Image (tube, helix red, strand yellow):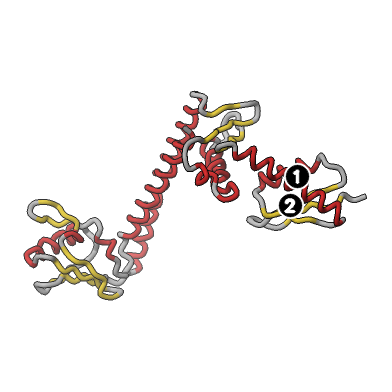
Amino acid sequence: MVNDIVKSLQGDIDKAIEAFRRELGKVRTGRANLSILDGVRVEYYGTPTPLNQVASLAVADARLITVKPWERSLIPEIEKAIRAAQLGLNPQSDGELVRLPMPALTQERRQELVKVVKKMAEECKVALRGARRDANEMLKEALKDSAITEDDERLHASLSGPDLGVVIGKRGHTIDAVQYLANAIVFRGGEGERKEIVVDAAGYRERRRSSLENLADRAASEALSIRGAVALEPMTAVERKIVHVHLAERDGVATSSEGTEPNRHVVVTPAPE
């Protein structure tokens, strides 16, 4: 259930971002870019047809696009479609080829482009907020349906299904990101009682905890043996906390976190006498 929600959310986010990229590609910045013509439709035997399906498009140089129709009789329709698209381009034809010089940007046009891009960005944000809101509602429904379990301190979401290795990711980075995202979308705004959401997959959290505790024990034994510091591999804040808490119960050793993210790590040393 939860992995379906996450996949749906990721799909919606990807679609919104891809749509934003396409819209940005249509912005005329003064340089020749074929994507500016993506929305142009030409009447071809009574059917509105994408320009690139009735002609060959090419960037002749940084300031010129050329359009070579597959049928010369289409040139008037192509010129008409380009003008109707209100792209700010003035098509020029020689009977064989349609040339589209890219006008130089004026200061006024630059200011207009800033407004256009801001509007596109806001539309993308609205789509992302909608995706987050939908995922939020689905997560709450999952809790009601007991797809997510709850105790006094945490909400536990367990993922199931094939390819869970991909969901977990290298050293758990992907599932940690999913957990962070789940907490962010559910508790955005900080209203009401807040509990940590713990996202797990195929018992990964418990296996990782056991592995970290064993690693901590070995590091502690080595630190006592050499009477010196032992640095562990870089870990997330959650994993470092597991090591600190585990070794806090062990006599004779002390722990500290050193370095900066993403290379922050735990150092185990003999406790001061």
Left or right of 190 in this view: 238: right
In the displayed structure, 172 sits above or below 31; it is: above
Dot placed on the residue nearer the N-terminal end, 1 or 2: 1
Q: Which residue is mark 1?
A: 244
Is any part of residue 116 visible from this angle?
Answer: no
Q: Residue at x 50, y 46 (%)?
A: 166
Left or right of 60 in this view: 219: right
Camera-side residue: 95 or 168? 168
Q: Which residue is mark 2?
A: 266
Camera-side residue: 2 or 183? 2
Three-letter amino acid code at the position of disc 1: His
Q: Residue at x 9, y 72 (%)?
A: 95
Q: Residue at x 71, y 58 (%)?
A: 259
Three-letter amino acid code at the position of disc 2: Val
Locate residue 42, reporting x and y percent.
Answer: 14, 57
Q: What is the CA distance from the residue labelled 1 to the residue labelled 2?
A: 8 Å
Camera-side residue: 210 or 60? 210
Q: Residue at x 8, y 67 (%)?
A: 72
Most extreme residue toward the right, as rendered? 273
Counting other residues with Cα less than 10 Å from the Cα at mark 2, is it few (<14), some (14-19), or many (20 or more)? many
Left or right of 155 in this view: 139: left
